[in-house]
Amino acid sequence: MTADQVVLIGVGNEYRHDDGAAAAVLAELTACGVEADRVALCDGEPTRLIDLWDGAALAVVVDAVHSHPGDPGRIHRIRTRGDATRPEHPGGGSHGLGLGEAVALARVLGRLPGELVVIAVEGGDFTIGQGLGPEVARAVPRAAELVREVLAEHRIRYGRS
């Protein structure tokens, strides 16, 4: 990966209801031709996340999160620069080890992207099964739009066409 590359990473599992939010956002973005050098769906395991964003100028990560109390469908946009210790997270991810641990480990290893933006969608149902809850399904287009905004801001800021 070169230092000017942009990666888009979805974290989640389509077979755990609202945990499939990232997959739905990625599907919407790729159907419209998202402008990223790499698009990947990941289970959230920290070393896989680090490998996906290593050396990137910008990594945009879409993830479903548990919040207590929760507000399914609520979207958070969190920005971390390469020198930050870990992103402020609205709640726990839906994975045992995940994004916060990946950021902390990547920092120690010197493998954070230049900029990390997390689009976190609050979920309500993470049980086994397919299909997003209605609130999360309604949030998918807005989350996709936030990703497009982040990518456009990056292109403008760094003169990338």
Image (cartoon, rainbow, N blue to C red):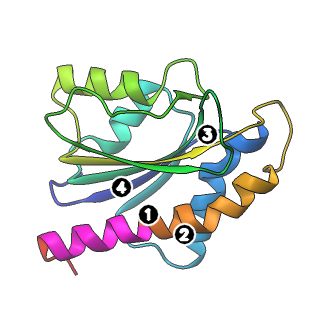
Mark number for residue 29? 2
* Label 3: how many Cα within 10 Å (few below 14, some 14–19, many 20+): many
Q: What segment carries the magenta color?
A: 148-157
Q: Nearer the viewer, residue 72 or 97?
A: 72
Q: Give the Cα separation between the discs numbered 2 and 1.
A: 8 Å
Magenta span main SS: helix
The amino acid type found where label 3 is placed reads: Gly
Task: Give whichever of discs 2 and 3 has the lower sequence position.
Answer: 3
Q: CB of mark 4 within 8 Å of CB of mark 1?
A: no
Q: Can residue 136 be seen in this view?
A: yes
Residue 93 rendering spot, x and y as whole percentages: 55, 29
User: Residue beneath label 3, please?
Assistant: 12
| Callout in the foreground (2, 1) | 1
Residue 103 left/right relative to 122: left
Q: Give the Cα separation between the discs numbered 4 and 2.
A: 13 Å
Residue located at (70% from left, 53% from top): 136
* Label 2: how many Cα within 10 Å (few below 14, some 14–19, many 20+): many
Q: Give the Cα separation between the discs numbered 4 and 3.
A: 16 Å
Q: CB of mark 4 within 8 Å of CB of mark 2?
A: no
| Callout in the foreground (4, 1) | 1
Residue located at (43% from left, 30% from top): 99
User: Residue beneath label 4, please?
Assistant: 7
Task: Give whichever of discs 3 and 1 has the lower sequence position.
Answer: 3
